[in-house]
Image (spheres, helix red, strand yellow):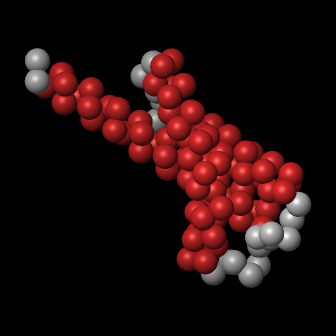
Amino acid sequence: MTDAPDAWMWTARGAGALAGSGISLAYMLPGSRREAALRFAVGVVSGLVFGGTAGLKIATELGVKETIGPLETMLMGSAAASLLAWWGLGLLIRAIRHKSRDMR
């Protein structure tokens, strides 16, 4: 994945992270602005940090590692990591809120 210049890799990583966080809005709307900001931030950071590893894993599992380029791999991985982190955090927040309501 080192064939592309660093600037393009960071652009793909950032675009994937932003896209994953944005797409997540369609799946689970946040309950408040604070929750939206928190989930968006976690999604972007997760996409930036885990994008390369997630992209390689997905490409390998799908059998397209040799077919797609490093920028597509990074974009795919960043979007997937961002999407899953945001979705998971949303579920966790809602579960904690639900449990705290039951304890009252």
Relative horizontal placement of residue 100, taking residue 11 as reference (left or right): left
The one of 62 and 81 positioned closer to us in this rendering = 81
The one of 85 and 3 positioned closer to us in this rendering = 3
The one of 36 and 8 positioned closer to us in this rendering = 8
Residue at 85% across, 71% down: 3
Residue at 46% across, 43% down: 87
- Count of numbered badges drawn on the protein: 0
The answer to whether one can see residue 13 in this image is: yes
Q: Quadrant of the N terminus?
A: bottom right
* Snapshot quadrant of residue 31: top left
Give the residue at the far left of this rendering: 103
| Relative image position of residue 48 (x, y in whole percent) | 65, 48
Residue at 19% across, 25% down: 100
| Relative image position of residue 53 (x, y in whole percent) | 60, 64
Q: Is 24 situated above or below 101?
A: below
Relative horizontal placement of residue 69, taking residue 63 as reference (left or right): right
Q: Quadrant of the C terminus?
A: top left
| Relative image position of residue 81 (x, y in whole percent) | 56, 53
The answer to whether one can see residue 26 in this image is: no
Residue at 63% across, 56% down: 51
* Snapshot quadrant of residue 89: top left
Q: Is 53 situated above or below 21?
A: below
| Relative image position of residue 43 (x, y in whole percent) | 56, 41
Relative horizontal placement of residue 99, taking residue 51 as reference (left or right): left
Relative horizontal placement of residue 15, taking residue 56 as reference (left or right): right
Q: Is 37 situated above or below 25?
A: above
